[in-house]
Amino acid sequence: MAPFFRIKCLLTLIFSTLLLSGCGLSDDTREQLKTAIGKAAGEAWDSTKAKTAKLADEISTKIEEHGGAQGIYDEITQYVDGLFEDSNDGSDSKKKSAQKSKPKQATPKTLVRRTPAQRNYHEEVLSLTTLKTASVIIDCLRPELDTAINVVVATYREVFEDDNYRPVITSGNDSDKHGERSAHYACAAVDIRIKDVEDIEIRKALAKAITEDLDTRYVVLHEDVGRANEHLHIQLRNGTYNRNEVWQ
């Protein structure tokens, strides 16, 4: 604990003790102070717990997206190998890349069909976006993701001040670059392009606004900031959906 923080806590405690021990205050005033201090402490604790839970969710999601601990280890190994490519013409790195297989995708056990209303909403929402390429698979996205995309569209349009702006979906249930247990392969996640916004601070504000607009069912990650693949990863929170369901 930093010395400054210790001093701050100590002064707060001394000040509170003096107030509550007398100093000419009436019993009613002291009770009010006790209540106020207790309320403030409770709110601070609740805020800390909420922030800690949010951070834990983000870390858990990042690890899962990168294939768990093994996936992160493989990425680090690949990076280190790349530092020495010049000394062996990159043959070892190419060999390892060729050996890397596509993550196994769980075989869906239950087919869930959208109601006519859900189908219409799904098509309406997707018509407000653009796919990066024809290979991006979004037909199986869960209804909750349709809701999230609708929020994303509204926020982007507000930032760009363009009621016709269509955000670009760069990945759905596709690509072999996600972790084996990624929510992408359960149709519970999408990646949205954000690098089109030139100002980095505006991109950060955009990511924050979308996070705040979505409820606690979702996790929003602003990934690869400042790099060519910078994007927003939006998914349903782990444990809130059945991975063995596929929507049509």
Image (cartoon, rainbow, N blue to C red):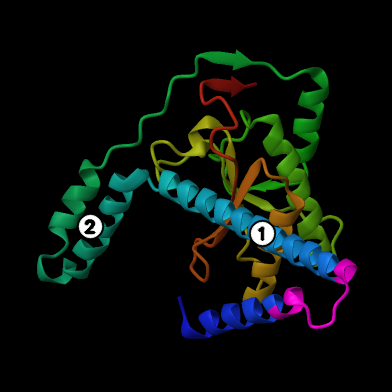
Residue drawn 21% across the image and 69% down it: 83
The amino acid type of the residue labelled 2 equals Thr
Vertical placement of residue 157 versus 169, above or below: below
Residue 188 seen from this side: yes
Q: Position of residue 162 (x, y in %)?
A: 84, 62
- The image quarter containing residue 149 is top right
Residue drawn 84% across the image and 82% down it: 24
The amino acid type of the residue labelled 1 equals Ser
Residue 77 - label: 2
- Which stretch is magenta? 18-29
Dot 1, crowdedness within 10 Å: few (<14), some or many (≥20)?
few
- The image quarter containing residue 136 is top right
- Which of discs 2 and 1 lies nearer the camera? The answer is 1
Q: Position of residue 11 (x, y in %)?
A: 62, 83
- Between 236 and 151, the residue placed more toward the observer is 236
- The image quarter containing residue 86 is bottom left
Q: Is residue 23 magenta?
A: yes
Residue drawn 21% across the image and 42% down it: 99
Vertical placement of residue 19 versus 83, above or below: below
Quadrant where the image shows the C terminus: top right
Q: Position of residue 64 (x, y in %)?
A: 43, 44
Q: How many marks?
A: 2
For label 1, the residue is 47
Residue drawn 49% across the image and 47% down it: 61
Q: Residue furthest top?
A: 110
Q: Secondary structure at mark 2?
A: helix
